[in-house]
Amino acid sequence: MMYECPNECGGQRFVQAIVQAKRVTVNERGEVIRQGGVGEPSISEPRCKQCGAEVEA
């Protein structure tokens, strides 16, 4: 999928960051009692590789 950068930099390469958080179980005192496997991946909006602008739909 190709996007056009909204900031006149002419960039057409857009990247998405994918962050996968670990699942952490905390008890009522705030202590970590279990760290599980990987949770749901969180995928950011596409951003321009050159200037970092978000894509405009």
Image: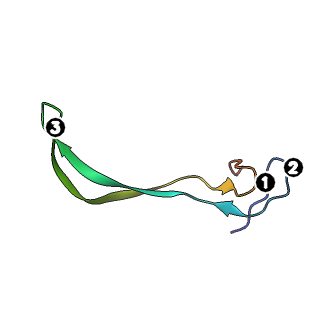
| Labels 1, 3: front one | 3
Q: Position of residue 57 (x, y in %)?
A: 70, 52
On the image, the x and y values in percent for residue 3 come to 74, 61
Q: Nearer the viewer, mark 2 or mark 3?
A: 3
User: Which of marks 3 and 1 precedes in the sequence?
Assistant: 1
Residue labelled with disc 1: 5
Q: Which mark is residue 8?
A: 2
Discs 2, 3 touching: Cβ within 8 Å: no
Q: Which mark is residue 31?
A: 3
- Disc 1 from disc 3: Cα separation: 45 Å
The residue tagged with tag 1: helix, strand or loop?
loop
Which residue is farthest top? 29
Crowdedness of circle 2 by 10 Å Cα count: few (<14), some, many (20+)?
Answer: few
Which of the 4 quarters of the picture holds residue 36?
bottom left
Residue 55's place in the image compared with 37, above or below, is above
What kind of residue is marked 1?
A: Cys
- Which quadrant of the figure has residue 40? bottom left
- Residue 49, by quadrant, is bottom right
Q: Position of residue 9 (x, y in %)?
A: 85, 52
Nearer the observer, 4 or 29: 29
Is 42 left, or right, of 57 in this rendering?
A: left
Kind of residue at disc 3: Glu
Callout 2 touching callout 1 (CB < 8 Å): yes
The residue shown at (73%, 67%) is: 2
Q: Residue at x 82, y 47 (%)?
A: 7
> Which percent across, then down, holds residue 55?
70, 52
Tag 2: amino acid: Glu
Q: Is residue 24 left or right of residue 10?
A: left
Q: How is the protein colored in the picture?
A: rainbow
